[in-house]
């Protein structure tokens, strides 16, 4: 399974809030939070082919361009699935992740899995939960992070294999 | 191993984190923390740890200039018990879904009902309240009153014991009448409690709580094993992505608060500082650059590591790290769910706690003065300001270097792994994904 992970500048290990102007980019190496996901994916004979990162301020200023490029690049790189997150309860990152996930879902055939905390994002989740599957995760510093990552990866596998994930969604997604 | 530990820790962490009483205690203290930080600055200016400071300014501003500053700091530090009652009753009322401003007001009245209002001066009795009842010694009484008064208030609200106003009455008026009967019940209960204590050998609720609860709890928690346990649990939880201090503070913060206030009072009165294990001790002498003492890790990343990713992150995170912000490294390295970094992340703060505890016990560094510095105050400066001695800075410097040595082999393992990945990626056309071609 070839996976693309969408991250903001904090989760990509490119600095804090002050680096919100980081332009859209990507590496062919696991970085930041993607490294944690990559270790778990390797146990499933899968890999991250590219963490895509984008500063949250840059995204806000260049929404259309970033959405178009992320969707196109995901297709071009032949991703089997895209994970949008983990966003924790970071509001700006959660917004970016949900919007990008919805675009990829709409404009490509690649399945998408979101990973977002309900805290600070209740309205956002309500807005997007019918369009994309969003796995429940804890807020920053909350309990259950490891389980939520496992759930996201399980859902990725199910989506790629075309398995029925209705029960899974009822249990672990919004 | 990681999974097993998580299975054991998770239920406890969830229970502690979700417990409404513990959460309210923590939130309540946070409400009054800004007041304490601001007034601490006034106290610090009046007692700056430079020889000749007071005399120098006395020559310019006159001999009473320190009183101007202590007037402000006294206003908060002499009322910390009452303020704790206010903050906790507000947080607890809010967390219980009640009108927090009402629960807060009624808790303060309950506190004053239990406070002696007559002071005997010589043979004369005058109507007054001694600040000893309202300050640090009254913190536990304040906590008790906050929790009990909100529970009684809630008891009445749940049973709908309220005076209903007709439609059309403004909400502020109707809410005020809503609170009438519940507030009356709270006042009645505390009135009876006051009478009960006045008939007992304790005479006051203050004496009862202070003797049977505050003193013994202070004694048990004011110890090196207690503080070691605090930091061990806090750091262990961080490794699972859980904000450890928010969990451990639920249990320890009332005690640390009391111990810190005791030192602050002594500092203000120029008497001997009584305690080692204050909130300042935890904040200033056990971790540097945030949880896990990650400033030491950042220094290794910046100076020794060779992989691009680690070095770049070191560069980006060092400045926030100096000011105690380690979010970029917690999520960016990442520290969470990273079994390699978990080991030093736990060991370094625990070892710092042990060393600092011993050094303070040996008297090599003066006890912390209780002045709450802004949490962004960098090490070296914070060590000096909190103890008034350069030895505090030296201890911090020593522990920073020790942290560097402990983090070194672990971050090098990650660095080597990243270097290998980067070398492998160098064989690819380009490591960076070029979005311009889209």
Image: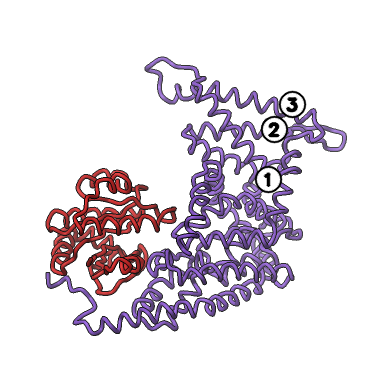
- Identify the disc placed on residue B114: 2
Residue B215 vs B222, above or below: the answer is above
Residue at 39% in and 64% down: B331
Question: According to the image, label 1 marks what residue?
Answer: B135
In the figure, the shade used to draw chain B is purple
Q: Nearer the viewer, residue A45 or B368?
A: A45
Seen as rendered, the residue at the extreme right is B123
Residue B425 figure quarter: bottom left
Question: According to the image, label 3 marks what residue?
Answer: B195
Residue at 64% in and 40% down: B142
Asked if one can make out residue B63 in the rendered structure from this viewpoint, the answer is no
- Identify the disc placed on residue B74: none
Q: Earlier in the sequence, mark 1 or mark 2?
A: 2
Chain letter, colour red in render: A
Q: Pointer 3 and pointer 2: residues touching (CB < 8 Å)?
A: no
**Disc 3 element:** helix
């Amino acid at each position: 399974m070839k996976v693309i992970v969408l991250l903001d500048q904090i989760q990509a290990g490119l600095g804090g809030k002050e680096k919100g102007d980081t332009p859209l980019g990507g590496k062919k190496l696991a970085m930041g939070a993607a490294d944690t996901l990559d270790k778990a994916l390797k146990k499933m004979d899968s890999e991250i082919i590219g963490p895509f990162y984008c500063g949250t301020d840059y995204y806000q200023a260049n929404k259309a361009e970033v959405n178009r490029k992320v969707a196109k690049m995901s297709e071009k790189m032949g991703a089997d699935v895209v994970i949008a997150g983990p966003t924790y309860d970071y509001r700006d990152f959660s917004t970016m992740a949900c919007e990008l996930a919805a675009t990829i879902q709409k404009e490509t055939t690649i399945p998408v899995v979101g990973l977002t905390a309900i805290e600070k994002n209740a309205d956002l989740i309500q807005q997007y939960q019918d369009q994309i599957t969003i796995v429940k995760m804890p807020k920053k510093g909350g309990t259950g992070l490891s389980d939520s990552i496992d759930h996201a990866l399980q859902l990725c596998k199910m989506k790629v294999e075309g398995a029925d994930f209705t029960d899974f969604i009822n249990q672990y997604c919004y | 191993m990681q999974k097993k530990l998580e299975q054991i820790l998770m239920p406890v962490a969830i229970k502690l984190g979700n417990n409404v009483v513990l959460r309210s205690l923590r939130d309540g203290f946070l409400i009054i923390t800004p007041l304490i930080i601001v007034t601490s600055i006034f106290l610090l200016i009046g007692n700056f740890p430079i020889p000749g400071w007071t005399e120098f300014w006395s020559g310019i501003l006159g001999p009473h200039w320190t009183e101007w500053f202590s007037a402000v700091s006294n206003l908060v530090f002499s009322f910390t018990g009452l303020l704790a009652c206010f903050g906790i009753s507000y947080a607890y009322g809010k967390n219980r879904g009640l009108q927090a401003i009402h629960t807060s007001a009624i808790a303060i009245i309950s506190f004053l009902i239990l406070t002696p209002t007559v002071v005997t001066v010589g043979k004369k009795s005058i109507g007054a309240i001694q600040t000893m009842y309202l300050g640090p010694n009254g913190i536990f009484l304040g906590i008790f009153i906050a929790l009990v008064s909100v529970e009684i208030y809630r008891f009445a609200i749940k049973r709908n014991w309220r005076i209903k106003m007709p439609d059309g009455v403004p909400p502020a008026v109707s809410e005020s009448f809503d609170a009438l009967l519940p507030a009356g019940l709270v006042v009645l209960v505390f009135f009876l409690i006051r009478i009960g204590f006045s008939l007992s050998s304790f005479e006051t609720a203050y004496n009862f709580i202070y003797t049977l609860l505050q003193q013994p709890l202070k004694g048990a928690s004011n110890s090196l094993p207690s503080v070691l346990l605090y930091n061990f649990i806090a750091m262990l939880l961080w490794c699972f992505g859980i904000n450890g201090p928010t969990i451990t503070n639920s249990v320890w913060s009332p005690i640390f608060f009391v111990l810190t206030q005791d030192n602050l009072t002594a500092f203000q009165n120029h008497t001997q500082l009584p305690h080692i294990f204050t909130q300042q001790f935890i904040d200033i002498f056990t971790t540097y650059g945030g949880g896990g003492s990650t400033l030491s890790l950042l220094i290794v990343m910046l100076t020794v590591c060779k992989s691009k990713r680690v070095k770049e992150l070191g560069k980006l995170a060092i400045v926030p790290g100096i000011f105690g912000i380690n979010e970029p490294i917690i999520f960016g390295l990442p520290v969470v769910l990273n079994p390699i970094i978990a080991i030093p992340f736990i060991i370094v703060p625990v070892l710092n706690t042990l060393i600092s505890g011993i050094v303070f016990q040996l008297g090599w560094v003066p006890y912390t003065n209780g002045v709450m510095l802004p949490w962004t105050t960098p090490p070296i400066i914070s060590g000096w300001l909190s103890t008034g001695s350069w030895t505090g800075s030296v201890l911090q410097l020593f522990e920073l270097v020790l942290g560097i040595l402990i983090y070194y082999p672990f971050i090098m393992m990650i660095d080597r792994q990243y270097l290998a990945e980067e070398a492998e990626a160098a064989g690819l056309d380009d490591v960076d994904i070029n979005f311009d071609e889209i």
